[in-house]
Image: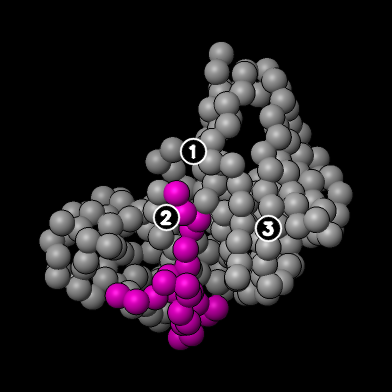
Amino acid sequence: GQNIDQPTEMTATEGAIVQINCTYQTSGFNGLFWYQQHAGEAPTFLSYNVLDGLEEKGRFSSFLSRSKGYSYLLLKELQMKDSASYLCAVRNNYQLIWGAGTKLIIKP
Amino acid sequence: NAGVTQTPKFQVLKTGQSMTLQCAQDMNHEYMSWYRQDPGMGLRLIHYSVGAGITDQGEVPNGYNVSRSTTEDFPLRLLSAAPSQTSVYFCASRLDVRNTGELFFGEGSRLTVL
C-alpha cells in the first residue's frame, strides 16, 4: 500500500525553529513536494526534493533521505503568518500521493 | 494573471441534485486535475487530464464526470449528489504532464450536500 505519515498538529513559538516530519512508504518514488495551506485557502508550493540532502529557500528548508523514506520541512524565525497546514506529497510516476497535513500553530 | 479560477466558491445541494464545478486556467497548462479535501485525509485525486480531449480517472472517480474540450477549461460534474460528496474541491493545473512541476491550485469550492 501507499502511506504518508505526518504529525496531525504542532505548536511552536514566534521566532523559534520548528521541524515538520514526513515519512512515506510508497510503491515508487520520483520526488517529494511540500505545500503550505492557510485555513480556507488553496495549497501553495514550497519545495521539491528529488535527491538526498537539504534544500534551503530563505527561512524554509526541506530535507530528503530516500533510503529512510523520510523528509522534513524546517521553518526558521517563525512568524505568525506561518500558522498554516503543511502538506507532504510524494510523486510516484505520474501521480501524487498526499499526506493528511500538519497543522502548525504559532504562539506569540 | 488570473491563474486557476474555480466557481462557485460555495454551494449547497440536496441529495440527488446535479451540478457542475467550473475550472479555468490561463497559463496554457497541459495537465489539469480535480481533488477533494476532507478533514483528516490527504488530498484525493478525482479525475485528471493531460490535454484537450484526454481524461482519466484518479483515486476516487465514482459519482463524478469530467471533460476537457479546450486546454483552458476542465469542469467537474456531480451526476446525483450524495452526502458523502460533501467536501472542499480543488482544481489544480501543472505546465507539464510528466509531474515534474509544481501544481497551481484554484481557491476551492466548498460543497455541502444535504
Q: Position of residue B6 (x, y in %)?
A: 37, 57
Reply above or below: A58 against B67: above
Which residue is depicted at the point 59% across and 42% down? A7
Residue type at mark 3 is Tyr
**CA distance for labels 3 and 1:** 23 Å
- Image mark for residue B83: none
Residues tagged 3 and 2 counted as in contact (Cβ below 8 A): no
Which residue is pictured at 68% across the width and 17% down the height?
Answer: A15
Q: Do tag 1 and tag 2 residues touch (Cβ < 8 Å)?
A: no
Q: Residue at x 73, y 62 (%)?
A: A31
- Circle 1 SS class: loop
In front: mark 1 or mark 2? 2
For the C terminus of chain B, the image quarter is bottom left
Q: Amino acid at mark 1?
A: His
The spot of residue A80 in percent (x, y) is 56, 22
- In this view, the residue in front, B36 or B33, is B36
Q: Residue at x 26, y 50 (%)?
A: B10
Query: According to the image, label 1 marks what residue?
Result: A38
Q: Is residue A43 left or right of residue B110?
A: right
Q: Which mark is residue A24?
A: 3
- Residue toward you, B99 or A52: A52
Q: Quadrant of residue B60?
A: bottom left
Three-letter amino acid code at the position of disc 2: Gln
Q: Which residue is mark 2?
A: B37
Number of numbered labels in the structure image? 3
* Residue A99 located left or right of residue A21: left
- Chain letter of disc 1? A
The part of the chain drawn in magenta is B40-63
Query: Do the residues indicated by labels 1 and 2 lie within the same chain of the protein?
Result: no
Residues tagged 3 and 1 counted as in contact (Cβ below 8 A): no
